[in-house]
Amino acid sequence: MNTQSASPPPASRSSASALPDVNAQTYPYDMVQAMLDQTANFSMFAVPASGYDDKATLTPDNPDDWFGLHGGYGLDLLSDLHRFEALIDARSSGVRASQEVGQATGKFHCLCLFSPPDFKWNTRQTPSPLIFDPWRSQHFVMQDCQVTFGEKHTCQCYGIGRTFPVSVNGRHVLLAAGVANIMKGTGKFEGREGTLIFTGTLTRQLQFQGNVNLRVRDSEDTLVSENDLHPIEAIHNPDRDNCFLELRLMKKNKNVKTSFGPPPGGNLVSLITPSEMRSVRYSYVAGGRGPRTHMQIGQVLGPMSATVFFDLAAPPGTAESPVPFTTQELYTFTTANGETVGTIACGVVEGISFGLKFPQAPGQPGVRFAGFGPIQGGTGVFAGAQGILTVNSLIGIAPHALSLMHCLHLVDPDQRYRQGAGG
Amino acid sequence: MSSSSVATPPNVNAAQRSAAATPDPQLIQRLIDQVAGFNLFVVPEGGNSAGRNGNGSTGFVLSEALHRFSITMQRPTAQGMQATNVLGENVGRVDLRWFMIPDNFVARPDRQPPQTRLNSSISQRFVMQETTFTFGDGRDGFRSFGTGRTFPMMVGKGPRVVVGGIGNITEGFGRFRGHEGNFTVCGDLTPNGFKGNILVRVQDNNGGLRTQGDLPPIQPQPDPDPDTTYLLWTAQKGTGADQENSASFGPDKQLRGLNIPTQLKLLELDFAASNGFHARDIKVGEVIGREIGFGRGSIPGADPSGTPMNPFLFEGVARYSFFGARGNTTGAITTNVLEGRRFDMRLPDAPSAPGLRFGFFGPILYGQGFFKGFEGMFYGATASVFNPPPGDHVITHFYMARMNDPQGKFRAAFAREQGWS
């Protein structure tokens, strides 16, 4: 995708011919692809920490200020992070994913303050209060967000999110998604660049349950393991109503070109980016030697086409001022024979991007970006699908290589997309 | 809500500043409790002259039966809290004209809303363009105007369009002539019309709506909604440090609202209409819990006055903790007031007192202790005299929780000898 920037100097864009060639090669495509893939990918499952709703508060330093009542003007979320692996199998009979939730490995804490829709990313300012309304889609700021593995390894993040009320068989369900940037790391995360994304459900106790994906740059390979990690120790699936399709996407080969689409208006351009979806197992451990990750790529699942809308003239995004973007995407799941099983249409409504540099390749522009948005509809086995898309990605600009970590969160009370009833 | 939601920020209103010299709080308490407070239950009979009911309808124009409705809550225990809910005899009719409206529509009695269709899968606003209550033979009653919201919700195994709404009396007739008051609606929009509770609070300074005599016993009718249970209690200010109001300041050091605690107490309301409308004095019982709440005006900088045409809008969050026999908290609910409407109220026997009356509703966000895992709606009707800290704050809330309760956990069996009063 990408949002913006990063790319070559915009110069003047008075006509389509003035747009930069994002397919040009500053460095060889394969080299850029390899650099983009130097990330540690943590796919985790958040389960609400038992009893925390009794302690949750927005004002821990002033418990007698009842503005801080959990659920009033914000949510104080604490979840246990578990290993999570979701392998997808696409056949003519349908698309099914394993949903293995494993042992607890850490904590996810997030203080979310609801904010007016026009509140912009601002790490130094608290939004003006907005009361929580479970029946409205609302924006929130992830004021204090932290992922912790053991005592030493932490990522402190800042981000933004939204709630998405949906009706599931007549039942009111509140989905939530957020995207955040690592502002500070400790232990193995010290000095790292990375992006966190989550999607899931707010439970009856107003705690978060769902998928959390953390992607951290790791050019030194100190987090990524080339070897298989010890197997997941599956626990009883704590979430029987949702399914998370984990995807790895990249271009099918270096000859696949990205093109500019019709300008959407304003200062924005649109970039049409074809890619190929694959099943993937994102594994990680967080033992005494610190966190380690491993990625195992599986079968081809079909094509994905994304149109990305962004301001080409914006300067590269930074932690204090990321560049926003939105997308419109179509996921087409096929069998090995190319038969279409179903499609999902969705788009990022809240996306942030950051300029990316490569010490090994000076002058090579790139973008780190993440975002989320609602599933708009589906066909075939995905007819009537509801849920949320999350993207957590890195790309090069000229060449336009892709390293995309996406998750399609499907509301799945009837377990249409799940392998095995117990998950 | 939180009583705090009604509060006007300190030092904003000159009238309130001068009100620090208003009469003794005990007198004020007596004055604001000169009230006809009563519960009605509306049972639909079908037939919507506005067209079809339910999903896709633009409004509800109906004449429905009003019933006496009695709620008697028992003292909380370690195991839980229960109340009897008794639908009583028919006491009159309610003629309503309610219409769905866009979220941004400014409703007024003289303004016809644009056609908006009910969508039972999302939350929508509606205007209670006219709701007329008539009691007994039709001589006593009142007309009203108000607004509300729908809340799609699952109760038991069935989806429902739950509604909350606040109405203000625009004209009384018969015994209600000249009275001011408000009511809060909570129930369901069903294919046959509105079904649910209306909690009414009518100021009764001269006692014309109340009787000191006995009311005829309630005549129980079949339960119209076994899957929900209504809990009723009151809240008033107590004494001591833990009952003092305080200001809440944001990170920018600016006042963002008020923290107001109250004591929760048992409450009994009753009325009858067999021989003209008569309500009993409200009966306030023992302390059963504590409220902690934060509230603020919904629109920053809005004029703090509240009039029938332009009520002051407020919102807030509160936690209601209920005590077991040993005084420990055994259950609690945290609620948000999404819509509150406040009206200035003059007390003839304390004309300088900054009187207020208001209604409010919102969801029960989550429960703890014996409320854990339960959902429902929270709403109420209130009167108060508020002076900013450290001035006196006198208040009587009528609080209601409508619990989604298909298993009957909160429902006590009705027997005539039951009751705490």
Image (cartoon, coloured by chain):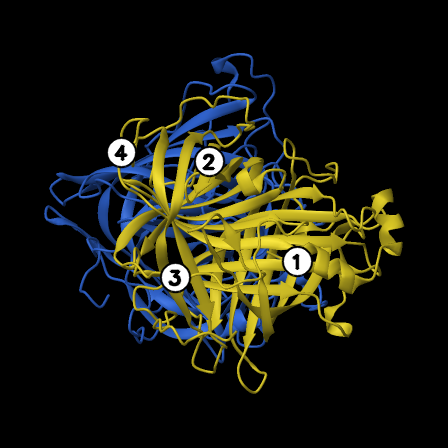
Chain colours: A blue, B yellow
- Residue B363 location (% of width, % of height): 48, 54
Residue B46 can be seen in this image: yes
Q: Nearer the viewer, residue A176 or B332?
A: B332
Q: Could you tell me which residue is drawn at 71 percent across and 40 percent down?
A: B300
* Amino acid at dot 4: Gly
Frontmost of labels 4 and 2 is 2
- Residue A13 location (% of width, % of height): 56, 17
Point out which mark residue B33 bears: 1
Point out which mark residue B218 bears: 3
B418 shown above or below A190: below
* Amino acid at dot 3: Ile
B405 shown above or below A160: below
The answer as to whether the residues below labels 4 and 1 share one chain is: yes
The answer as to whether the residues below labels 1 and 2 share one chain is: yes
Q: Is residue B103 left or right of residue A101?
A: right
Q: Nearer the viewer, residue A52 or A332?
A: A52
Judge the density around disc 4: few (<14), some (14-19), many (≥20) Cα neighbours within 10 Å: some
**Residue lying farthest bottom?**
B326
Q: Which secondary structure lies at badge 4?
A: loop
Point out which mark residue B47 bears: 4
A173 shown above or below A293: above
Going from the N terminus, do you reach mark 1 or mark 3 first?
Answer: 1
